[in-house]
Image: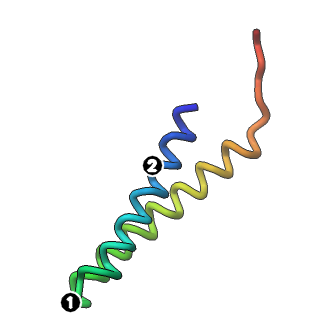
Amino acid sequence: MWISFGSMGFMFIAMLLMLFVHSKVTNKWVAWPIRIVAWVCLILGFISMLYIIFNPTRGTA
């Protein structure tokens, strides 16, 4: 469950960073590192979401 919260957090941070760069940042030398961080967050969120989807559950109730 915590992994899914982390992946949603990564995707949310990526969305906020991309929105911030698109609307507020005009200097491209400042925008590129922020975009790279946003893409890394998006990729980490995607990979962790794939882990959640394709990992078999181990119900031990």
**Residue placed furthest toward the top:** 61
**Going by the image, does 23 lie left or right of 39?**
left
N-terminal of the pair, mark 2 or mark 1, is 2
Q: Residues within 10 Å of mark 1 (few under 14, many from 20)?
A: few
- Label 2: how many Cα within 10 Å (few below 14, some 14–19, many 20+): some
Quadrant housing residue 36 = bottom left
Q: Are marks 2 and 1 in contact (CB under 8 Å)?
A: no
Marks 2 and 1 sit apart, C-alpha to C-alpha, by 27 Å
Rendered image: mark on residue 9:
2
Task: Give the residue pinned by disc 1.
Answer: 27
Say which quadrant the N terminus sits in. top right
Q: How many marks?
A: 2
- Which residue ends up furthest to the front in the rendered image? 23
Residue shown at 50% from the left, 63% from the top: 42
Q: Residue at x 28, y 82 (%)?
A: 31
Image quarter where the C terminus lies is top right
What's the amino acid at mark 1?
Asn
Q: Which quadrant holds residue 21?
A: bottom left
Residue 6 coordinates in the image, percent (x, y): 48, 43
Name the element at disc 1.
Answer: loop
